[in-house]
Amino acid sequence: MRKADGEMMQKSVWLPILLLILLTSLVSIFLPIHKSFTFTDYRSDHPKTYYVELENDRNFQIRYVHSIFLTDVIESYQVTETDKLQFLSMQYEDVGIGLPGYAEEGETLVIEDGVYTLSYDDNRIQSFVLFVGDVDADLAFKYRDKEINLKNYLARGESYKFCVQRLSWYQKMKGVQMNGEQ
């Protein structure tokens, strides 16, 4: 065998290996495998995604100050096996707009020490739109004992679609990770 034939065989062996490595790298960059809570610009031609990685804990809360009563409202959710959002309960201190004083079918209302807890039997949704008010009032996302001030990341006066979705590494790099340290 001539030297040129040996070099040719080496090149022909390495080419498929390099192509396989390149293909694997591309797939891993663009394959959506990272399950995350996402807040995506709702009315934008070029929506930006803000995310918190979803780990084993499937429970989370959204805490906000009610715009009229100026008291905390805590909404508790759970992510289902099919990545839907199951509304578990809502806690509040005052009754009025958006804060009912009674339970409807499929709900239970308990009042204890001046705190209303409205629980839901089976209220599941795929997503919801969150409006970030342009007021100096708290709006927080609580997950794994860490509370993230959403107004440090999301623009006031804007709406965001909130859901659980899988992101690729590329999408994560284009988005903004909300880690609560800002």
Image (cartoon, helix red, strand yellow):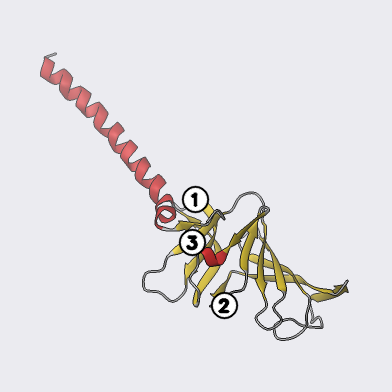
The residue singled out by tag 1 in the image is 33
Q: Quadrant of residue 60?
A: bottom right
Q: Which of the two discs, 2 and 1, labels the residue nearer the N terminus?
A: 1
Q: Pick whichever, 141 or 33, lies toward us.
A: 141
Q: Pick whichever, 3 or 171, lies toward us.
A: 171
Of badges 1 and 3, nearer the viewer stands 3
- At mark 3, the secondary structure is strand
Residue drawn at x 12%, y 15% as measured from the top left: 3
**The residue under label 2 is which amino acid type?**
Val
The residue singled out by tag 3 in the image is 50
Residue 46 on image: x %, y %:
37, 69
Q: CA distance from mark 2 to mark 1?
A: 36 Å
Q: Which of the two discs, 1 and 3, labels the residue nearer the N terminus?
A: 1
Residue drawn at x 70%, y 69% as measured from the top left: 75
Q: Residue furthest top?
A: 1
- Label placed on residue 135: 2
Apparent side of residue 159 relative to residue 84 in the rendered image (left or right): left
Of badges 3 and 2, nearer the viewer stands 2
Residue 93, placed above or below residue 86: below
- At mark 2, the secondary structure is loop
Q: Quadrant of residue 58?
A: bottom right
Residue 87, placed above or below residue 36: below
Q: CA distance from mark 3 to mark 2?
A: 21 Å
Q: Which of the two discs, 3 and 2, labels the residue nearer the N terminus?
A: 3
- Numbered-mark total: 3
Q: Pick whichever, 131 or 82, lies toward us.
A: 131
Residue drawn at x 50%, y 74% as measured from the top left: 156
**The residue under label 1 is which amino acid type?**
Ile
Mark 1 is surrounded, within 10 Å at the Cα level, by few (under 14), some (14 to 19) or many (20 or more) other residues, namely: few
Mark 2 is surrounded, within 10 Å at the Cα level, by few (under 14), some (14 to 19) or many (20 or more) other residues, namely: few
Q: Quadrant of residue 113?
A: bottom right
Apparent side of residue 74 relative to residue 43 in the rendered image (left or right): right
